[in-house]
Image: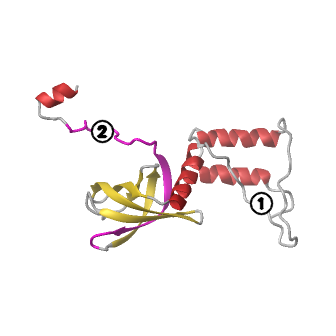
Amino acid sequence: MLELQKRNGLAGISPMGRDRRIAPRYSFTAEAEALDAHSRARMSARTSDISRGGCYVDTFCPFPQNSSVKIRILRDNRALVADAKVVYSKLGMGMGLSFSAIDAENRQVLDTWIGELSGTAPIVFKDFVDTSRAEPIAPPQVAKNDASYVVGELIIALMRCGALGPPEGNALLLKLLKPEGLP
């Protein structure tokens, strides 16, 4: 194939539609703020997917291809800040960013998000808090053959295969685990 491309003067050109990513990407909607390193132009937008290598930012006026940017992504009270390069830019659609530099703290945030999205990280729930008590109320313990345990496992399986989105799945799990009498 490469030999044929060389003969036709196409060496180095990837076929249309071929995915050149080295890391799997996941649907990921979050607030994003990008700053063009050269012009200092700033934009607020949102991400639509993310991987360990970069992200896609939905925006009508993307930065030009090959621009160096600083990106800040905010989701669930966590922020990721990284240097990136615009590898794809389409006016009216958005831009694909490749992360070029991420420090250890921000890499940990990214790895946590990727773990949650890929289903490799355990789902962690915040403790239920009764405002009249100082200590948190632990979720009720259930046997592995209990119906609520089985339903919880089913919800997690649906989230891992993509049939149920994380916001909906987590909301269902919280309802399932909510102790009686708490709002």
Look at mark 1 in the image and give the residue it sits on.
127
- Which image quarter: residue 77? bottom right
Q: Residue at x 11, y 28 (%)?
A: 7
Residue 15 magenta-highlighted: yes
Whether residue 31 sits left or right of residue 170 in the image: it is left
Q: Give the range drawn in magenta.
A: 12-39
Q: How is the image coloured?
A: secondary structure
Q: For the view shown, which residue lies furthest in the front direction? A: 104
Residue 142 position within the rendered picture, expressed as x and y whole percent measured from the top left: 85, 44
Mark number for residue 17?
A: 2
Q: Residue at x 85, y 67 (%)?
A: 135
Residue 155 visible in image: yes
Which structural element holds mark 2? loop
Whether residue 168 sits left or right of residue 93 in the image: it is right
Q: Residue at x 55, y 56 (%)?
A: 108
State the CA–CA distance, disc 2 to disc 1: 45 Å
Q: Residue at x 46, y 49 (%)?
A: 52
Lower sequence index among marks 2 and 1: 2
Residue 14 position within the rendered picture, expressed as x and y whole percent measured from the top left: 25, 38
Q: Nearer the viewer, mark 2 or mark 1?
A: 1
Number of on-image labels: 2
Disc 2 and disc 1 in contact, CB within 8 angstroms: no
What secondary structure characterizes most of the magenta part? loop
Q: For the view shown, which residue lies furthest in the left direction? A: 8
- Residue type, label 2: Gly
Label 1 environment density (alpha carbons within 10 Å; few <14, some 14–19, many ≥20): few
**127 or 100: nearer the viewer:** 100
Residue 4 position within the rendered picture, expressed as x and y whole percent measured from the top left: 17, 26
Image position of 69 with respect to 28: above or below: below
**153 or 147: nearer the viewer:** 153
